[in-house]
Amino acid sequence: MTGSAARAAAFRTLHDEVQTPLFMPVGTQATVKAQLPQTLEDSGSQILLANTYHLLLRPGLDVFRRMGGIHEFMSWKHSVLTDSGGYQIFSLPHSRSITEEGAVFQSYTDGRTILLSPEVSIEAQVAIGSDIMMALDQCVASTADEVVARAALELTQRWAARSLAARGDSPQAMFGIVQGALYPELRRESALGLAEMGFDGFAIGGLAVGEGKSEREDTCAFTAGLLPEDKPRYLMGVGTPLDILEAVHRGVDMFDCIIPTQVAQRGGVFTSRGYLQMRRGVYKFSDEPLDPACDCPTCRRYSRAYLHHLTKTRETLGWQLLGKHNFHFYHRLLREIRASILSDTFLALYQEKQAALHEDDLDNPVLKQAPKKTKRLALGNYEIHTAREGFSSIRHIHSGEIMHSRTPPMEEAQRLYIDQSRLSERLRGAESGPLVIWDVGLGAGANAMAAVDCYERDPAPARNLHIVSFENDLDSLRLAFRNNDRFRYLRHSGPAAILKSGTWQSKSHPGLAWTLVPGNFLETPGGTRLPPDLIFYDMFSGKTNAEAWTLAAFRRLFAACRERRAELFTYTCSTASRIAMLAAGFFVARGRSTGDKTETTIALTPQADRTGRELLATDWLAKWRRSTARFPADLAAAEHSAWEEVILRHEQFRDLARKPLDTRDETNF
Ligand SMILES: [Zn+2]
């Protein structure tokens, strides 16, 4: 077979010759639910599956012995395969225990304690009189760990040998069952061991019990490839038409599943036009057949409208008619597959069916509810918030935190960062080299754009300005930019370029440049070779972003600018943040109020000009001593006791008590 492991073959049972690949309807209680044996025969069923476990309990083996076996009993003249009961031991929740001897469980019909051993299982299958018996196995969840899977596999191998021995001189065929969960080496050990025992065929067990589709397909392909070429391979409990197509492609010959009758009971049918759910109202007035490409008795005689009605009223006839069609669909699919294998055109069929079997009703598609036409006011973790005063700002959805909640963004940026930093004054200063602003927490770009605006309004700035923005999530800027009718300061070439390429060089003001440093700021402060003169520190609060306010964060900031006359501005006035700044080496002063904050914070390097700054003093120290947040969160507990002295030794506070000392280096712990 070209490009596929698909096989077409035939083998003889005690009743007839069967042609593979084939699908076996499940007749748990010696009946395929809601279907006449004649219907099954007409649809092309070659083998029915019956469940030893259930038939052993009821009607009991004596009935089969007296009635001449299951064929006579249920009036089915073709082949029957009986499972061993292993799957029911695994799946039914009755109290049970598994020993070397077998599985002990309580009968659900009369409460008797029953031992299902390999010998009992084979004795039962002989009495039932199936054409193909299955060896007793221990099935475990496919997701079982390796120890459990290995133990189950080894027990299964021993039970397989006992099952074969128990067959005696019965002419019935017997298949062994490969276990081993999803472990290739266990599957190999199981397959090779069973192959040596001389079974008539092999089942791939322990799949369709908890694994994902690709895991199942990989394990199926791998296991099938280990099995003898000249014996049938049976994938137990699988599956949908698509599952079967995939497994045939991987070298499997036989399948069983309750799906055709189970979905029919609920109104489901597989058709050449996709999978239909007959409860849907779209079929209420439809005089079409279920499937225009099907010649089954249901499709020849009944309309979709009638089948819709029977389904809605839960009439047994609806279940029966839909199930009948589903069996025709399954068997026709397998006959088509077999014909394509024999003519070496399976791959083309595989591709065509693979696409078609994925579909729901092609002619009456289930309409996904159309997305409401809302303006795009959210993006990623951010949404636009409109204040009562009418201005817009950005809210972090997860934390609920709003950037610039009480004051329009540009107003706050101007007040807190541009005015306090005396930016326009510094741009006119005599210092050489560009003035560098670290805009930490670009957000919706208000602080950076306020600096851009400040530079552009200066008729003759003496220094160049380079803004370096740090941001790990550009969605807030992107969202504001898309809604720049609400964020008018973003109607500018700068933000557009930053979003597009991460860098901007002003054409009208050659001395003005802007660079984005993407990523987590705390991991990137060394990522720029431009040490800052000004830091606009506008990160989310400690509740949302705790690490932005730690001792470690401020130490890194201090390290980046300690040799310069640098200043840091931030909106917070929290004691814990200020103490972290002090400990990192900054001098700390009160900043002006904004919004509902009565004060903010300015941190200065030792070289910075402290003229006019309101440095924290004794009143703040007293407050600090009373505070419950006396230590930065990341300060080791062992350091707590020495902490007060560390702060008191800071040059900022020594100045208060004594005359100033030139011991600046000591502050840089
Ligand atoms: Zn049909």
Image: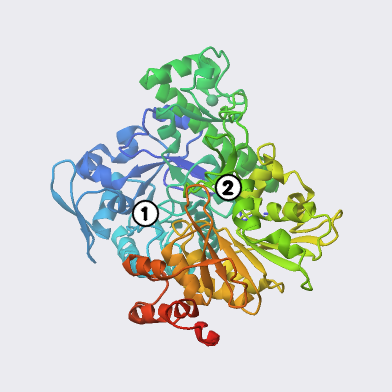
Colouring mode (rainbow / by chain / secondary structure / one colour): rainbow
Looking at the rendering, which quadrant does residue 47 occupy?
top left
Between 451 and 113, which is closer to the camera in this rendering?
A: 451
Q: Which residue is mark 1?
A: 134
Looking at the rendering, which quadrant does residue 526 occupy?
bottom right
SS at circle 1: strand
Q: Residue at x 34, y 70 (%)?
A: 625
Q: Residue furthest front?
A: 659
Q: Is residue 311 left or right of residue 411?
A: left
Looking at the rendering, which quadrant does residue 633 occupy?
bottom left
**Where's residue 343, x and y in %?**
70, 45
Ligand 1 has an atom within 8 Å of the beta carbon of the residue at disc 1: no
Which comes sooner in the sequence, label 2 or label 1? Answer: 1
The kind of residue tagged 2 is Gly
- For mark 1, does the 10 Å Cα neighbourhood hold few (<14), some (14 to 19), or many (20 or more) residues? many
- Contact (Cβ within 8 Å) of mark 2 with mark 1: no
Between 366 and 246, which is closer to the camera in this rendering?
A: 366
Instruction: Assign ligand 1 to one image quadrant.
Output: top right
Between 517 and 380, which is closer to the camera in this rendering?
A: 517
**Where's residue 236, x and y in %?**
43, 50
SS at circle 2: loop
The kind of residue tagged 1 is Met
Q: Please, is residue 630 above or below residue 19 in the view?
A: below
Q: CA distance from mark 2 to mark 1?
A: 55 Å
- For mark 2, does the 10 Å Cα neighbourhood hold few (<14), some (14 to 19), or many (20 or more) residues? few
**Where's residue 290, x and y in %?**
55, 22
**Where's residue 357, x and y in %?**
59, 38
Label placed on residue 613:
none
**The N terminus is located in which quarter?**
bottom right
Q: Please, is residue 137 above or below residue 359 in the view?
A: below
Q: Which residue is mark 2?
A: 380
